[in-house]
Amino acid sequence: MKKNSIFLLFLFFLGCSSTNLIQEKKEYVTYLDEKYIQSLNFKNKDLALININNKWYYVKKNGKAMNVIVDEHGKPDSFNEGLARTRINGKIGYFNRDLDIVLPPFYDYAFPFHNGIAEVCIGCKQEEHKVLDGGEWKRIDRSGILIEK
């Protein structure tokens, strides 16, 4: 009886700890209607860049679309070192050319990657004229790991 109780207790804790390790994957992409996709000119490329309701999107031929932020010149963000930036619920993250989120939207502001490093800010506020105020600036690598200065 004691062995069975210990075994059941072990299974209970194993089950509880494994559920903590499983995290639901968030879906950040959207899919466009097939009829709309057929009207796009991909120019022999895998991605098209389109503007819908004053928002820019990268779109794949299968209709998968990812919102892309505009840079300081008002142009849609381009891929730097294979990653572009997106803004979701007010936070910035990075996605790849497959339109998969590589670094989830966590940052209040983030610059494009350069030589494998990006400057990111947590807690900064963006003023009307694109001036960034306050917050804590960090440097991250492409996996999102903080780099010591």
Image (tube, rainbow, N blue to C red):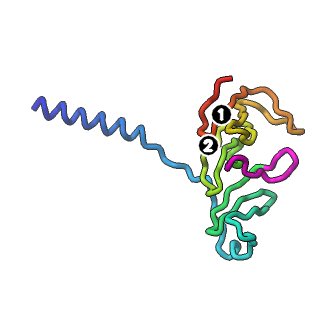
Alpha carbons under labels 1 and 2: distance apart: 10 Å
Secondary structure of residue under mark 1 = strand
Q: What is the residue that sits farthest to the front in this orientation? A: 115
Q: Give the quadrant of residue 116.
A: top right
Q: Give the quadrant of residue 99.
A: bottom right
Q: What is the residue that sits farthest to the right in this orientation? A: 129
Query: What range of the chain is rendered magenta?
Result: 70-82
Q: What is the residue that sits farthest to the top in this orientation? A: 149
Give the residue drawn at x 76%, y 31%.
124
Quadrant holding the N terminus: top left
Residue assigned mark 2? 103
Q: Give the quadrant of residue 149.
A: top right
Number of marks in the rendered image: 2
Q: Is residue 45 left or right of residue 70?
A: left
Give the residue drawn at x 66%, y 60%.
65
Q: Is residue 2 left or right of residue 42?
A: left
Badge 1 density bin: few <14, some 14–19, many ≥20, Cα 10 Å: some
Q: Is residue 66 magenta?
A: no
Q: Answer yes or no: do the residues labelled 1 and 2 have beta carbons within 8 Å?
A: yes
Residue assigned mark 1? 140
Q: Which sits earlier in the primary sequence, circle 1 or circle 2?
A: 2
Q: Nearer the viewer, residue 101 or 8?
A: 101
